[in-house]
Image (cartoon, coloured by chain):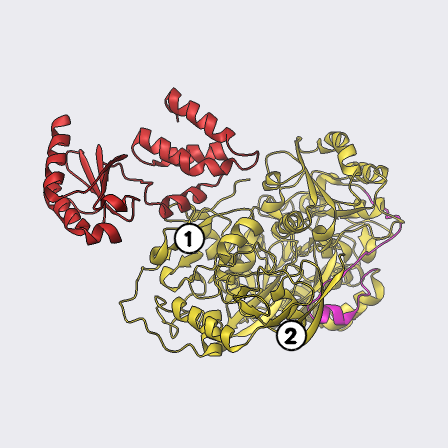
Amino acid sequence: MTFSPELEARFARLIENYPPGRQKGALIPMLLYAQDEIGSVTPELLAEVAKRLHVKQVEIEEVLGYYTMLTREPRGKHHIQVCTNVSCMLTGGEELYAHACKKLGIGNRQKTADGQFSLEEVECIGACSWAPAMLVNYDFHFNMTPEKLDSLIDSLRKMQ
Amino acid sequence: MADPITLTIDGKQVNVPAGTLVIEAAKQVGIEIPAFCYYEGFSLQAACRMCLVEVEKMPKLQPSCTLPAAEGMVIHTESPKVVDARKGMLEFLLTNHPLDCPVCDKGGECELQDMTFRYGAGESRFVEIKHHVDEKQWSPAVYYDAARCILCYRCIRVCDEGLGVGALGLTYRGVGAEITPSHGDHLECDECGWCIDVCPVGALTSGTYRYKSRPWEMNYAGTICTHCGDGCKTTLSVRNGEVIRANNRDRSGINDEFLCVKGRFGFDFVHSPERLQSPLMRRNGKLEPVSWSEAIGLVSDKFLEVAARGGSFGVIGSTRATNEESYFLQKFARQGLETNNIDHHRSGDVATLLDALSGKTKALATVNDLYTAKAALVVGADLAQQHPLLAYQLRANWRHHQSSTYVVSEGPVREDQYAAKSVRAAAGAELAALEGLREDLKKHGDLVILFGASVKGDAVRSLVAFGDSLGIPVTYVCLVDYSNSRGAMDMGVLPDLAPGYKAVDKPGMNIDEMLTSPTLDVLWVVGANPLEHTQLKNEKAFVVVQELFLTETAQRADVVFPAASAYEKSGTVTNVCGEVQRLKAGPKVMGAKPDLEIMGLLAKQMGLNLGIWTPDKVFEEIRRSVRGYNVALPVIATGGAAPTMPVNGRIPVSPRPDLIRPSGDTLFTSGTLGRYSRMLNKVMEAPGQLYKP
């Protein structure tokens, strides 16, 4: 399978970071970058990465099952991750998550019918000082309230 | 070896070499430290925390499976602190364990059960609903029940490291963690089933055995697998005369615990509904069941009549019969029928090898040598496919001792994964490729050369000359295909060589000559299927067949005797490396008799004096008269393997390389027997059967 020239260049740099015989270490970053480009870890991607890093496919399955940031199902254009871990929970994270579910009409690890949004309840995202916090793709949003969430989602909707 | 280390375990002093793990050191003084994830011979995991021990001057409990012994260590393996920790671990392991022991296959031989019993961890503080996952079928042979799994990783390691297949992994995490097969919902593997054996609980269960029996309701018979020439010990679990499981958990044979799909699941041909259970006689062109006395009487009369008028006999022996049977058969032919027209299906040129090695001692490698040699050279063979045990030994040698393996083969083979060098050469042209490896091969201290059927006749002599020219000790294995191919040759089931490769006065007809002779009067086939792809030339010949099934040859017969399989009889067999091992009868199939008994009854009816026909007596005669077979009886009586060197002088070989025809069996086929094994057929039809190098 083929990737964009930028991603290929990134892979080439990535593999050089590891000593000879330890290229297997590039597995997780490679999957993440490729997932960003393709949208999910497809069976073809899995086979391609296995071939390039000389690992067995089942080893990649192990990684895929373990790390929730890797996904086999394509996500929405805007992947919303709401933290409900301790600091966020204490400051309204659970209500925020419940509100997001209601607003988008989907549950955990689901996608809206138009493919615009997907939602995930996640553990600590390292933003406790600004709890409750959430992520839209790679962007943080801090000190969230249900109202702020509404306007954020509405503005994202308009972006399309 | 490094300086020994002295340490104290539970008040007992023990000396071990540096680098020994505490768990192993404890074994030496008879202390068993419990462990689920630790498995001798495989990589360390330290996942189960059962082997925690208290080490004086160390603040926390230490896992003894990864702790190397150190000088002056004082260890307590059953202190209250340790016992408490183990009890706690068991409580965790049992939180989601379904505790369906009353119906679990493993109940009674389960390590988790034993440990819970030992530490009395009978109470649980866990009151939540148990996480349940339904059982899955991964292949015809392997089922997985995730709820029972304790995630010890044993199965993953034996598959990946032991066999080089790596069909298992561990996915998801926390309470949802479970073992996953290589291809989504099914396995793509060798289907050897070793994962099932090593599973300490009942998470992996066997397609042939699941929900069939309790372990204490069976009898166990340690015998030798009858499917290929490697001679693995397989312990049959027999219930009411029926085999329902085969494994080798006691590590008693040359194969330790290793068995391939045939050894572990291929036993079911024994109970095939197509087994012959009564003698058959041709009447009005049809084979009809008759009594033993009638069938024996007819064959005896016919043999005597043909002998009296000086007619010609042809005798075809078996590659699966015991040494005793092969010996008795050739004695019957040579003394009773006064003919040298005796042969069998040859699959390797052992005679030429033994001749080329004339005058050398210690020139034949044993199965264990493959694990200890510094280097091995595989010529013209796909070991993982045709000799799974030998492939396993070479891989284990590489894993544990960093030995070097060199491969010269026609296509890619699994040994390429770790081979020092792999060279591709067409069948028959392998020797030319060896020169390129000369310098590499020389640099190792010793070498085992294994060669397949494409190296035969003069090529064997050239190969031995090449081995001699390396200037290092070289041992050889001539790869033969069937469970007693080697024994059939050693026992003189050959037209030109008597037992022990002694010349006969007047060589008889070989197998091809018998089948194509227009004047052959009698063809007597014992446990072979020579007419599978060919017709018997003389249509009038009287054909007697001793066989398990109504094979193509049996269908042509005038009289068929139902024969017992190797699993139903006693005797000895000689494996591909020339090691003699003993069979032990396990199951019973009504109506069938061992070939030796059939031959004995026939001899008695004919009034021939060929000696007593019990396996022990015939083996006594073999020990006395066949060179190299004078093995120590206690060795084989206790399930050991005794190496033989049946000759050490020139052999009057009449080279017939054209008669050497490899069986072409794969990991999943086993000639006639494989055709009647439901499990082997099921495995081949399932999507998961793999053979990829």
**Mark toward the viewer: 1 or 2:** 2
Of all chains in the rendering, the one displayed in yellow is B
Vertical order, B116 against A115 (above or below) = below
Residue B396, how many percent across, how many down? Answer: 64, 51
In the depicted view, which residue is nearer to us: B236 or B587? B236
Check disc 1 and report its element: helix, strand or loop. Answer: loop
**B632 is within the stretch colored magenta:** yes
Residue B343 numbered mark, or none: none
Question: Which quadrant is the N terminus of chain B positioned in?
Answer: bottom right
Write the residue at 26% across / 67% down: B129
- Chain assignment, label 2: B
**Quadrant of the image occupied by residue A49:** top left
Disc 1 residue type? Ser
Figure colour of chain A: red
Residue B56, how many percent across, how many down? Answer: 60, 70
Disc 2 residue type? Gly
How dense is the environment of label 1, judged by Cα within 10 Å: few (below 14), some, or many (20 and up)? many
Tell me which segment is drawn in magenta.
B628-654
Residue B139 numbered mark, or none: 1
How dense is the environment of label 2, judged by Cα within 10 Å: few (below 14), some, or many (20 and up)? few
Q: Main secondary structure of the magenta part?
A: loop
Vertical order, B287 against B418 (above or below) = below
In the picture of the structure, the residue carrying the numbered disc 2 is: B30
